[in-house]
Image: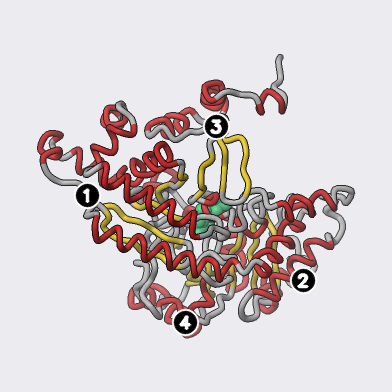
Amino acid sequence: MKLMTIDDALSMTRSELRKTYSDYVNPGFVKLLGLVNIDRHFVRASGVSIWDEDGAEYYDFLGGFGALNFGHNPPEVLDAIERVRQCPNLVKLDLNPFAAALAHNLAQILPGELSRSFFCNSGTEAIEGAIKTARIATSKPGIVYCERSFHGKSMGSLSVTGRPQYQERFAPLVPECYRVPFGDLDSLELALNQGNIAAFIVEPIQGEGGINVPPPGYLRGARELCNRYGVLLILDEIQTGFGRTGRMFACEEDGIAPDIICLSKSLSAGVVPIGAFVTTPEIWDRAYGSIETALLHTSTFGGNTFACVAGLVAIELALTRKVDENAREMGALLLSGLSELAERHAFIKEVRGRGLLIGIEFAEMKGALDRLTGGLASQLSREYAAALVAGELMNKHRIVTAYTLSNPNVIRVEPPLIVNRNHVEALLQALDETLTRNKNTLGLAVSTSKTVIKSLLSRR
Ligand SMILES: Cc1ncc(COP(=O)(O)O)c(C=O)c1O
């Protein structure tokens, strides 16, 4: 037996890393990243920047899928964790003071009566807890959710994630989950009026589904319908929370408060895994208010010292750095720059979003290449255009972006909320050059990697 050390991990070359990851973690993922040649070996990170093993600097416009609102490795968070290194991280038979303080602070910044927190370790766990809480508090089973939603991949969350491709192979899922179109209040009313519904779960702006902003008034309308039919409103602010959309929480834009809110990602500044759902004292007490029910829903690592200390500092950073204001300002700059690019490049079909949660949707490619490939080029561009553009941005311009999970034709622009004008202009210029250089997606593919089209075609 030969065990690898931290030093071994630190000194791996890119090809050693590929092999070890492929052998012991996930070979398919290694191949997927290899298709557009974007598996850099990053060795250092700070703020908006990450550096590869050759010392080249990249701007991170992916921001850990929304977990890095305050940038990579915020020193304030790392210092705070260092400060409490003598404290027990886990005892479990005590009342952790950092969990109490974090829950207290969340109650100060969340809207409405949201003030009882349950801490866990990821987004999907926050959703699981919210669904269970809705069921136990209402004694009803049904959960209504939206098409193209993304709430996570554990069994309960998957059952309310509106992407059949993720769900089908794991059937049967949790029963009594009903899907409705996103943004459509008439369909929502029909679904809520069944008598057996505990909750409606929704993202204020859909992230993984392609950065979809609902029509104005949708959240407020949903709130009213939930009140009318005695259904709890669960808002998933796992990706939209902590300043991302230009407000501390996206629901503030609509002036509403949910009955349960789910948080994760930037809640601990992306340094320590954390998740939480927060509800009202009334709903909490209905669900877990007695000695018998107090521990019906638990998690070993939930509320541990390091995660909660990171959370305390993350909230402080969000408030003192005014990251919501910067998200509004830089988001407006980016959106107007991207809209201007969309006028010049037909390949950009649409630009949408709010604050620094922005999606760029690419058009389908039609024409000669389609005739040559029997329609496959179009299918390729529909499914992989965003990945190909992301590959170009990474390889030629050292800018990290990615497509959205449920809509691979959309690039998500979701940088740390501390980006400045220089970062924004670098992205706009890189995108302009990429789209000028490559008039169609196949051109992009070829310039990104000679083998990409062959590999993609052979996978079908
Ligand atoms: C809105 C939303 N909900 C839930 C999740 C699931 O979070 P996790 O990956 O931590 O389980 C995500 C992750 O991207 C998300 O964006």
Q: Please provide percent x and percent y for residue 207.
A: 45, 59
At x 66% / y 28%, what residue is drawn? 10
Residue behind mark 2: 290
Residue that numbered label 1 is attached to:
364
In the image, the residue with mark 3 has its CB under 8 Å from the nearest atom of ligand 1: no
Mark 1 secondary-structure assignment:
loop
Q: Along the polypeptide, which appears first: circle 4 or circle 2?
A: 4
Q: Which residue is mark 4?
A: 229
What residue did someone put label 3 on? 41
> What is the quadrant of residue 374 in the picture?
top left
Residue 205 shown left or right of residue 259 in the figure: left
Question: Mark 2 packing: few (<14 Cα in 10 Å), some, or many (20+)?
Answer: few
Instruction: Name the N-terminal-most of marks 3 and 4.
Output: 3
Say which residue appears at 19% left-offset and 46% top-offset. Answer: 365
Badge 1 local density, few (<14 within 10 Å), some, or many (20+)?
Answer: many
For the residues labelled 3 and 4, the Cα–Cα distance comes to 52 Å
Dot placed on the residue nearer the N-terminal end, 2 or 3: 3
Mark 3 or mark 1, which is nearer the start of the sequence?
Answer: 3
- The amino acid beneath tag 2 is Ser
Q: Are marks 3 and 4 in contact (CB under 8 Å)?
A: no
